[in-house]
Image (cartoon, coloured by chain):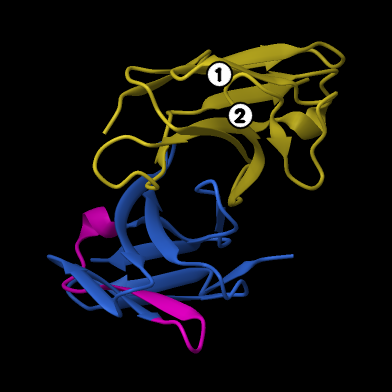
Amino acid sequence: SAVISQKPSRDICQRGTSLTIQCQVDSQVTMMFWYRQQPGQSLTLIATANQGSEATYESGFVIDKFPISRPNLTFSTLTVSNMSPEDSSIYLCSVTGTGYLTDTQYFGPGTRLTVL
Amino acid sequence: GENVEQHPSTLSVQEGDSAVIKCTYSDSASNYFPWYKQELGKRPQLIIDIRSNVGEKKDQRIAVTLNKTAKHFSLHITETQPEDSAVYFCAASIGRDDKIIFGKGTRLHILP
């Protein structure tokens, strides 16, 4: 499977600021997704990052709060805008389209965000 | 909307015994069912998956069964070991484009 990295690995931010998280894959992938995992909870899909077009957001998530870019088949960014303490969470990217079984999802290491 | 229910939320098993985690899904079009293991502070790792054209799949001590009629699937871990202690998530595919939704997770404790 592909090697997936995320930057930063963790950050502590002030209320009202924004943070951009990067997801880099070492090979071209078909799909890229962004998830949120709040402390002790399951994974919630935020959006599908579409290459060359606007992301597809899940119910409860909007582009103004979580703008996403995917300029090519190996890279995506998620921005958490105008942050509040409720945004404190782990944000993970995942990819499909690596290896033989193209729909299997593999996860990046995550970005642990704390908002004060 | 579509959802995946997972039970139990916590499971304690004596080392060497078996553990079973059960999930049900709502979308009859779901055809892919992965299971992930997440250790504390780590990313979810795929441990086994099953597709709708088979009823059971086994990989060493781990097996998954699928009942499409009843819309439920289960993870079975035999001869449990301390390193099996983790949170386990089931998931089911929804729609197209490789999207999956997750159950709420099961925290598995292996007791010495």
Q: Chain of mark 2?
A: A
Could you say which is closer to the camera, residue A59 or residue A114? A59
Is residue B21 something that shows in the picture? Answer: no
Q: Are marks 1 and 2 in contact (CB under 8 Å)?
A: yes
x 55%, y 18%: residue:
A76
Check the image and name the residue furthest to the front.
A52
Q: Identify residue for label 2.
A: A49
Secondary structure under badge 2?
strand
User: Residue A43, image x and y in percent?
Assistant: 58, 47
Left or right of residue A99, residue A86 in this image: right
x 75%, y 21%: residue:
A67
Q: Is residue A69 magenta?
A: no
Gap in angstroms between the C-alphas marked 1 and 2 = 7 Å
Is A9 rendered above or below residue B68? above
- Mark positioned earlier in the residue sequence (1 or 2): 2
Q: Quadrant of residue A80?
A: top right
Q: Which chain is tinted blue?
A: B
Identify the amino acid type marked 1.
Ser
- Numbered tag placed on residue A76 in the rendering: 1
Is A65 rendered above or below residue A17? below
Q: Is residue B81 magenta?
A: yes
User: Residue A101, image x and y in percent?
Assistant: 29, 47
Identify the amino acid type marked 2.
Ala
The magenta-colored residue range is: B67-84
x 40%, y 28%: residue:
A29
Task: Identify the image quadrant of the N terminus of chain A.
Answer: top left
Dot 1: within a 10 Å radius of its alpha carbon, few (fewer than 14), some, or many (20 or more) residues?
many
User: Residue A106, image x and y in percent?
Assistant: 39, 39
x 32%, y 34%: residue:
A98
Secondary structure under badge 1?
strand
- Numbered tag placed on residue A114 in the rendering: none
